[in-house]
Image: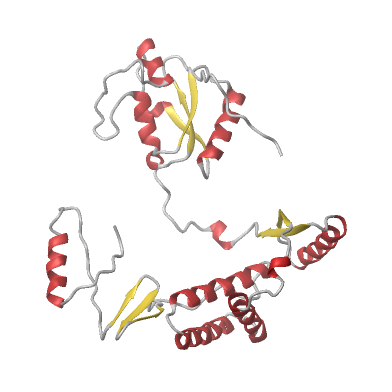
Amino acid sequence: MDDIFVLFCNKDNVNKFDKYINSRHKNMNFSKEVEIDSCISFLDIKIKRCMEFVTSIYRKPTFSGIYMNFKSHAPIEYTKGLINCLLYRIFNLCSNWDIIHREINNLKAILLRNKYPLNFIDYHVRIFLRNIFVASLNKGEVTSKEEIRIILPFLGNQSNIVKRQLNRLFCEFYPNAKLKIIWTCGIKIGNYFKFKDIIPSHIRSLVIYQYTCSGCNTTYIGKTKRHYKVRMCEHLGISHLTGKKLKYNYSNTTAVREHIEKSGHIGNFDDFNILNNARNDFECLIKESLLIKKFDPELNKQIKSFQLKLF
């Protein structure tokens, strides 16, 4: 539970509620922030209470105003997307046009410091506002085209030449299709630095793992979308909360635990290791199928396989 916006009739109720909610559990600790001069910030929004709520953009005191530099080695679509994203944020968070106008001017000043040309900024502001308010006169007559997407590495100006050539070929040979090129930047500064702490292996999820019996080297390959430790405990027949041994149930067991019970070998966490990870459960299924096919583990006895398709 985080970031709760609450309205009270008077200030005394604020302290009463704060005292009450912090008394519910010893491990819960809530802090409060009250309005100052009828203003308060909530997430990215600055809220002012007058006859009605007036909202605008809130920026933290540590806000540096640094965005992607216009002269960065990146596709022009990235800079266009940045402007549209920030304009969309202004349009949706600000409550009236006076504030929207002021925030757009602030945005222009920030982007100019990031080397964005003024005519480039003004052009995309006009396009953004036109897309919101001006409906196409022939909207009903426009037929949607099939969109074909391809992903290519960004190589500077050469990529723009390739894009023009591909668009020309599509117009000539596939007039009923629309080409959308997605550029990827292979090497970034972020590739050389880790901004987040490494997740401990026992709480990782969406992983493909292998079990190797320490007594007979029998193997098993599986996947889990839950915490890695939870799945290991299920195989070992112990509670992931208390570590105590669970009663064996023949009708509801795993291949690994069945092997441990029948062979009498002792299983432990060291018998498991992570082979790979995935972004979602579907990718987990694919990688698990490929690894089972490659290593042919003895304990995998699926009666059906996951159908793989090649494109």
- How many numbered marks are there? 0
- Who's the residue at 60% across and 81% down the image? 125
Instruction: Please state the horizontal and vertical placement of residue 308, each as a whole percent of the image.
Output: 64, 32
Residue 33: name its quadrant.
bottom left
The C terminus appears in which quarter of the rendering? top right
**Picture layout, residue 248 above or below residue 50:** above
The N terminus appears in which quarter of the rendering? bottom left
Instruction: Please state the horizontal and vertical placement of residue 188, each as a whole percent of the image.
Output: 60, 61
74 relative to 93 in the view: left or right: right
Q: Nearer the viewer, residue 267 or 86?
A: 86
- Who's the residue at 46% across and 32% down the image? 273
Residue 129: name its quadrant.
bottom right
Coloring scheme used: secondary structure
Instruction: Please state the horizontal and vertical placement of residue 258, each as a whole percent of the image.
Output: 39, 16
**Picture layout, residue 259 above or below residue 112:** above
Task: For residue 162, say whether it is visible.
Answer: yes
Residue 240: name its quadrant.
top left
Q: Nearer the viewer, residue 149 or 290?
A: 149
Q: Nearer the viewer, residue 111 or 191?
A: 111
233 relative to 10 in the view: left or right: right
- Who's the residue at 71% across and 61% down the image? 154
**Picture layout, residue 169 above or below residue 255:** below
- Who's the residue at 80% across and 57% down the image? 176
Instruction: Please state the horizontal and vertical placement of residue 10, each as a whole percent of the image.
Output: 15, 77
Task: For residue 68, say whether it is visible.
Answer: no
Residue furthest to the right in view is 172
Residue furthest to the front in view is 140
